[in-house]
Image: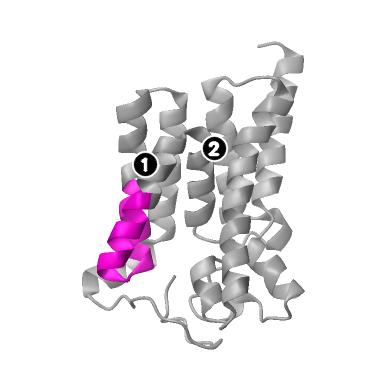
Amino acid sequence: MDANNLMQVVLGVLAAYLMGSVSSAVVVSKLRGLADPRSYGSGNPGATNMLRSGDKLAAALTLLGDAAKGLLAVLLVPRLMGSDSPALLAAVALAVFLGHLWPVFFGFRGGKGVATALGVLLGLSIWVGLACLATWLLVFRVSRTSSLAALVAASVAPLAWWALHGLDPVFVGVLLMTMLLVWRHRTNIRALRAGVEHGFQTDRPTDDKSHRG
């Protein structure tokens, strides 16, 4: 790889990270005159916590926005770079995900990455993305616990990629995303193990951080 190609890759990864750094929850909250989602409920700027504001449209817009940035990053950035190499796809996928977790525009206080990861997976492989979405819906239907559904669906992602596409650089990217997503849910995991994780519910903004999502 020559210097020009390397610079293109660096710029592509940076562009993906900046796309991921746009926090849909914070932006939507400001546009709709809602409290900052990092100030109530679980403190997580994601769709589940946005539901606790009582504004279902805001939650839906957050979900769509977070998924869309993951999807668009893996579809557009490699195309603009003129390459669809697995290594570049993996780097872009991981960069947009990292941007969501630690957004430079919002003090590096981001979400847990569930919707963004789904968008990334749908962009990388529609079948892997749909497999994870179906898993999330099934687990949530049974448990009514979004964190458990997210953890199980995330665990399916690298297995589904391996089964459908083999072990390639994208598999490594998907595996790293899964590991990061699980790590971001470490508080939820402790609550699940203790049997105190809250099921799905909506409530008005509160400072009580015991509601996780």
* Residue at the disc numbered 2: 123
**Residue type, mark 2 in image:** Gly
How far apart are the alpha carbons under marks 1 and 2?
13 Å
Residue 86 as seen in the image, left or right of residue 157: right
Report which quarter residue 30 is drawn in. Answer: bottom right
Depth check: give the residue in front, 138 or 2.
Answer: 138
Magenta span: 134-155
Q: Earlier in the sequence, mark 1 or mark 2?
A: 2
**Residue 55 in sight in this render:** yes
Give left or right: position of 78 versus 158: right
The quadrant holding residue 176 is: top left
Q: Nearer the viewer, residue 106 or 205?
A: 205
Specify the amino acid type for callout 1.
Ala
Where 47 sits versus 184, above or below? below
Residue 46 among magenta residues: no
Counting other residues with Cα less than 10 Å from the Cα at mark 1, is it few (<14), some (14-19), or many (20 or more)? many
Marks 1, 2: nearer the viewer: 2
Q: What residue is at 37 percent from the left and 32 percent from the top?
A: 161
Badge 2 marks a residue whose secondary structure is helix
Q: What residue lies at 71% left-to-right and 17% top-to-bottom?
A: 5
| Residue 108 relative to residue 196: left or right | right
Residue identifier under label 1: 157
Quadrant the C terminus occupies: bottom left
Q: Residue at x 64, y 41 (%)?
A: 72
**Furthest residue in direction top, as rendered:** 2
Q: Position of residue 24 (x, y in %)?
A: 65, 62
Magenta stretch secondary structure, dominant: helix
